[in-house]
Image (cartoon, rainbow, N blue to C red):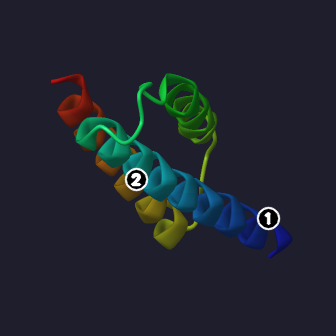
Amino acid sequence: MDDRREIGKQLQDLEQQLRELQIRYEKYFSGAEKLEPLKQREDFYRLLRHFANRRIVQTDLRFKYQNLATRYHTYSAQWDR
């Protein structure tokens, strides 16, 4: 049960980081920020890969991870354009 809470908390933190990264890119594209947030993007991707190599047994947590990964890849393709 502790493992479930720990993974849930980590995924919640990951979701918050994705929101912050999205906001930073919106600021970058609007001209408010001069530099692209590449370091934050790289850090987020590293954390996302950490979960890719981890076996998540609980279906709801696995779904949440897959949803986050899909959203990141969608945003990433948009940011690269």
Nearest to viewer (mark 1 / mark 2): 2
Residue drawn at (49%, 31%) of the image: 41
Residue drawn at (47%, 51%) of the image: 18
Query: Which sits earlier in the primary sequence, circle 1 or circle 2?
Result: 1
- Residue tagged 1: 3
- Residue tagged 2: 23
Q: Amino acid at mark 1?
A: Asp
* Percent coordinates x, y for residue 15 in the rendering: 51, 59
* Percent coordinates x, y for residue 58 in the rendering: 57, 67
* Percent coordinates x, y for residue 20 in the rendering: 50, 54
Residue drawn at (49%, 24%) of the image: 38
Residue 76 placement: quadrant: top left
For the residues labelled 1 and 2, say whether their Cβ atoms are less than 8 Å apart. Answer: no
Q: Quadrant of the C terminus?
A: top left
Q: Is residue 18 left or right of residue 43?
A: left
Distance in Å between CA atoms under marks 1 and 2 = 30 Å
The residue tagged with tag 2: helix, strand or loop? helix
Q: Amino acid at mark 2?
A: Ile
